[in-house]
Amino acid sequence: MAEERRPQRLRTMSGWLARLGFTDADSAVTLLDGCGIGSREIVERVSQGADPDLALRSLCALAKAYAGLGEERPADTAPTLEQMLEADPEMLTRLVAVLGASEALGEFLVRHPAAVMDLRATTMPLEPRDQAAYEVVLSDVTDGDALRIAYRRQLTQIAARDLTRHSSYEETSAELSDLAGATLATALRLACAEVEGAEQARLAVIAMGKCGGRELNYVSDVDVVFVHAPADGVDEQRATRVATRLASTLMRICSDHTREGTIWEVDANLRPEGKDGPLVRMVSSHVAYYERWASTWEFQALLKARPVAGDVELGREYVDALMPKVWQAVTRPHFVGDTRAMRRRVIDNIPSEQLDRELKLGPGGLRDVEFAVQLLQLVHGRTDERLRVRSTTAALRALVDGGYVGRTDGAAMTEAYTFLRMFEHRIQLDRLRRTHLVPTDPGTLRMIGRTLAFRTDPAANLLKEWQAQRREVLRLHHKLFYRPLLDAVAAMPADALRLTPEAAQARLEALGYNDPRAALIHIAALTTGVRRSAAIQRQLMPAMLAWFAESPNPDGGLLAFRKVSESLGATHWYLRKLRDEGAGAEQLAKLLAGSAYATDLILRAPEAVAILGDDAELAPRGLERIVTETRSAARRHEDPAEAIRTVRRVRRRELSRVATSDVLGRLDIVDVGHALSDIGVATLEAALTVATRTVAAQRGDVPTRMSVVLMGRLGGREAGYGSDADVMFVHDPLPGADESAASQSATAVATELRRILAGAGPDPAFEVDADLRPEGRSGPLVRTLASYRAYYARWSMVWEAQALLRAAPVVGDPELSAAFRDLIDPLRWPADGVSEHDVREIRRIKARVDSERLPRGADPATHLKLGRGGIADVEWTVQLMQMQHAHDVEGLRTTETLPALHAGVDAGLISADDATVLEDAWRLASRIRNGYVLLRNRPAVSLPSNANDRAGVAWLLGYGIDGGEHMVDDYLRATRRARQVVERLFWG
């Protein structure tokens, strides 16, 4: 009924305003009637403001205030605000933008309606102004309130340019900083007029923080440091008192709250000793403090230091004296760690209820960007003066241009930082309050969203974008701020980073490079030029050289690094990975300088570098996964040659993975044996498929089932890097098949399998040795299951039963493999154990092996396999125990040495102490044997006699670069003790 009683005009007007977007259309009608604004054009423009209702309230109040100006209104202006706005559409646009986004600036204009004329097309500067221009504007200011009014008028113009998108974030922040600098200069001028004897002291105001970096907010404390000096002929103490009064008066003028409000707080707490220190210091006092007492964060704060007011020469003297110390601060102990810890403390101190709303200090906030950028500046700025810039966005550009941050990451971080800073600006602009908390009020969020060009559901889309940018900042912060390369570079002396020819050669010699001249050639090849890759290499090189020097072969590591870099340097990921994931760079250095075997695999396929730094990728893959991949590769390619090339590539990749993990100390010797054996099984499985298909294509269907029986170390899952694949081939003709044809086909398959795996190619060969088969090389390469049964029943010797302890029929036809296992189990684990005659025969054969197979001139004390207390001694002792007791002890029925040894302890067949002695000797000998292959890429026979080889193997085993003799002592001690146990248990 109330609606029906309203005049038609009001109902029509209210509906129109509602359609325009005013939330309280009735109040809007009342406001318009009261202020006399009737222009539809103006109302429609107001409706386009960020908050139309706020803009209309402020506009109507301003119209009334403007009407009351009377004679104060300039003669060239219209008598009413409405007329002036209709005549100046640009002014209308600016005014609506300001009034719709800032209640505080609207209130200011209502208090000082003449200030609205600053937005006219004829008076409004189109381009941002610098500090000098603002100082001219403020030159007629004579007191504090006049300064506050003049400051707000200039702030209104900056906001108008910002909100109408006539200035970018960087331009706006720089202009706010320049206005702050001019305000400080004006406040100092006023202070000089107020303080008696002001001429007796020289005072410079150094802007810090965001003002120093020319990236100030709309509302922020302005961080400063005061530097003073006595005027000519003035006593130092007198000058200090005067300078202190000048600084205090300046701070009061800017910080006082009056009827005109306040400008901002001037915060001098970044000065030496903070609040407890003197407000002003001379340059020499500042220098002394930073040389002796300053904390890490104080050097980080100095990054932004910029003279903005007062004595220009004194300000320059301050900067010139302290900035060199900023760029050396990174060499302080724990600098990088302290900086990271400080960032964590900032987050820990945020109240829990504010953590998710904290735009500046919270995770993924502005501080995450700033800390990451500043840490990169401080670490790399020692030697690269291009990084010595103050603003965050300028520093990001310099870091990208210098190759310290990837282009994509740099662009993403710049975009995120710009968005967050603009969001912060809009939050503060509303009430001109210093806050960094994201509002919860939907109306405020809607207003801010509209100022940031979110037109559809602005509040929701604003929050969605904020969360997306926050996640991106957090990702990039962790990537850059915790980059391991920073610790390595920060720890180096500056002369090592510059790599001048003379300093570099001296440095290389000191690091232990045998051929510094050759090393310099490699360095020059990688780092010379203007290419981005050369720039990144210049960052990497100092750390890589130091990491190479921690290994036994730094020269070889550098040469290999050059080869890998030349192979992969043009890829989009290689150098970026090493730069951004320092753990990968350090791991690569260790591989290239410490392992010829791993280096050879990497040089064969440099893309293997991609797994470095990724713990999940470095872990060896399980048998099932590798078998699935190799089997799929074998079946996917019709061409047998291409199929086996793919299988061998998979083998090479997995060998590289295992070798890498081993060199990096991530695998136990048992884990290495299992991993290498699994690779061998998967390779043989796929090769059998390819060979069978090849023979079938040549001869027709293969009329038999086949199985490959793993023997030796491969069967025992104790394969080493230099191990061949010891195998036996068994087949079983299909029902109705001609036995001769089946045998010929099986032999052809076995021969083809050995050929395709042993052939030369880009991937390592895999020798398949079938000499452990019955009758050795004199016997047939492949036998039927029946033939094996007949042979073992009639001719088998005890040494062949012992060899079968390692037999693992796991490749090929599952049923045939199971049948073969059923055949050999009674032979290797006889029901009543081995006879005394067989025990004597085993000992006789062992004695013959010790005397005849030990190479001439070999030292029995250092031969890894056949030496006293070596691998064979331990394995023969365990195998004898298996043959004697496996019929009673199920745990002994295994092809692996150590599980059998542990089962003997559990069964009381051997003491735990004796087992520990045997295991220690076996492990150490096996590790040294693998270590030598890793080091030199050739098999090891004895303990290395060459000092460099000993040092290299010891380093791989974790003894350190000088641990060669320590390793030898440990080996001799372990094998001597093992031999004593073998004498008792094996020889009796």
Image (spheres, rainbow, N blue to C red):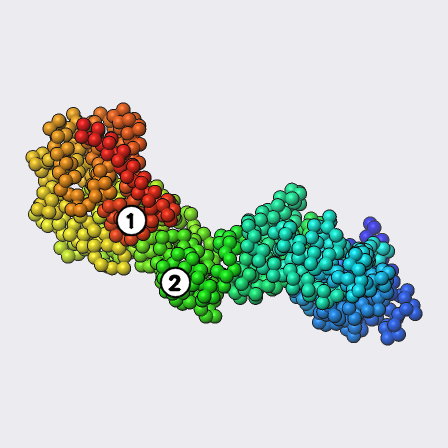
- Mark 1 and 2 residues: CB-CB less than 8 Å, in contact? no
Q: Which image quadrant is residue 171 in?
A: bottom right
Q: Relative to the observer, which residue lies in front, 97 or 285?
A: 285
Q: Is residue 569 above or below residue 820?
A: below
Q: Secondary structure at mark 2?
A: helix
- Left/right of residue 186 with respect to residue 894 in the rendered view: right
Q: Is residue 80 above or below residue 370?
A: below
Q: Earlier in the sequence, mark 1 or mark 2?
A: 2
Q: Relative to the observer, which residue lies in front, 878 or 192?
A: 192
Q: Is residue 63 above or below residue 883?
A: below
Number of the label disc, if any, that sits on residue 932 = 1
Q: Residue at x 11, y 44 (%)?
A: 776
Q: Horizontal and vertical percent for residue 639?
A: 24, 59
Q: Amino acid at mark 1?
A: Tyr
Number of the label disc, if any, that sits on residue 516 = 2
Q: Residue at x 42, y 56 (%)?
A: 511
- Left/right of residue 459 with respect to residue 542 in the rendered view: right
Count the numbered circles shown. 2
Q: Horizontal and vertical percent for residue 906?
A: 29, 26
Q: Amino acid at mark 2?
A: Pro
Q: Secondary structure at mark 1?
A: helix
- Left/right of residue 600 with respect to residue 336 in the rendered view: left
Q: Residue at x 58, y 55 (%)?
A: 329
Q: Horizontal and vertical percent for residue 587?
A: 41, 52
Query: Which quarter shows the C terminus?
Result: top left
Q: Residue at x 85, y 62 (%)?
A: 197
